[in-house]
């Protein structure tokens, strides 16, 4: 089946989640900079969650750009991914109010871990659908997924002993994804060049 609807649906949901995320920010108690400074933890956690959503959106965009089709399993993996991403505003607000408490931190990490695992499952299904010799199979960077899952899982475990370690590991897991995947970008450029060449021949 074509991929256009899954792209449009995902874009809309992530945009809504980002909007909800910013609406969860509370205003300072008064008009002073001191009151604003009191909310610094809330802003830091907001930025972490926003960056997480942005990374997912960016990688989802690239992943679908080099995919030619999706199947029913991919649709359900994508819906499951959106389920966990939609929980990010809730866990962000909870952690913001109780930064050094075990339950909010571990729950935040668990949601991130679930999203990472579902992302890996969706990528695996797309590779299976297109074949082991396809462009998507050659372009997907599995090491990043392993690193991300490993770091977040470690953070969830450590969070039961040192709550703030969960958030720290979640932040560390984002670092590899900030580096653009050159193989996907190269394939997208080659595909665009091929399309232009085809139009000229027509």
Image (spheres, helix red, strand yellow):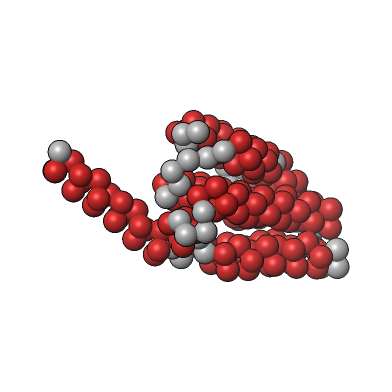
Q: Position of residue 38 (x, y in %)?
A: 66, 52
Q: Residue shown at 48%/40% (left/top)?
A: 69
The reply to whether residue 172 is visible in this rendering is no
The reply to whether residue 121 is visible in this rendering is yes
Q: Position of residue 37 (x, y in %)?
A: 61, 54
Front-most of residues 73 and 106? 73
Q: How many marks can you see?
A: 0
Residue 103 shown left or right of residue 4 in the figure: right
Residue 113 shown left or right of residue 53 in the figure: right
Front-most of residues 116 and 170? 116
Front-most of residues 44 and 193? 193
Q: Position of residue 102 (x, y in %)?
A: 84, 58
Q: Position of residue 112 (x, y in %)?
A: 69, 53
In this rendering, is residue 7 above or below 157?
above
Q: Quadrant of the C terminus?
A: top left
Q: Residue shown at 78%/51% (left/top)?
A: 107
Q: Residue shown at 46%/34% (left/top)?
A: 2
In this rendering, is residue 25 above or below 149?
above
Q: Residue shown at 70%/67% (left/top)?
A: 150
């Amino acid at each position: 089946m074509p991929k256009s609807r899954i792209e449009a649906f995902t874009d809309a949901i992530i945009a809504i989640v980002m909007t909800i995320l910013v609406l969860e920010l509370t205003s300072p108690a008064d008009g002073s900079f001191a009151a604003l400074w009191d909310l610094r933890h809330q802003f830091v956690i907001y930025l972490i969650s926003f960056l997480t959503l942005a990374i997912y959106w960016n990688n989802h965009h690239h992943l679908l750009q080099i995919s030619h089709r999706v199947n029913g399993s991919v649709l359900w993996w994508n819906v499951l991914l959106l389920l966990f991403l939609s929980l990010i505003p809730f866990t962000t607000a909870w952690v913001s109010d109780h930064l050094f408490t075990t339950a909010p931190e571990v729950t935040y990490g668990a949601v991130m871990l679930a999203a990472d695992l579902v992302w890996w499952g969706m990528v695996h299904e797309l590779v299976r659908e297109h074949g082991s010799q396809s462009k998507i199979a050659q372009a997907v960077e599995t090491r990043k997924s392993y690193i991300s899952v490993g770091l977040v899982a470690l953070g969830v475990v450590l969070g039961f002993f040192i709550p703030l370690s969960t958030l720290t590991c979640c932040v560390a897991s984002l670092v590899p994804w900030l580096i653009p995947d050159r193989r996907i970008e190269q394939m997208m450029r080659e595909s665009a060049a091929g399309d232009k060449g085809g139009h000229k021949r027509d």
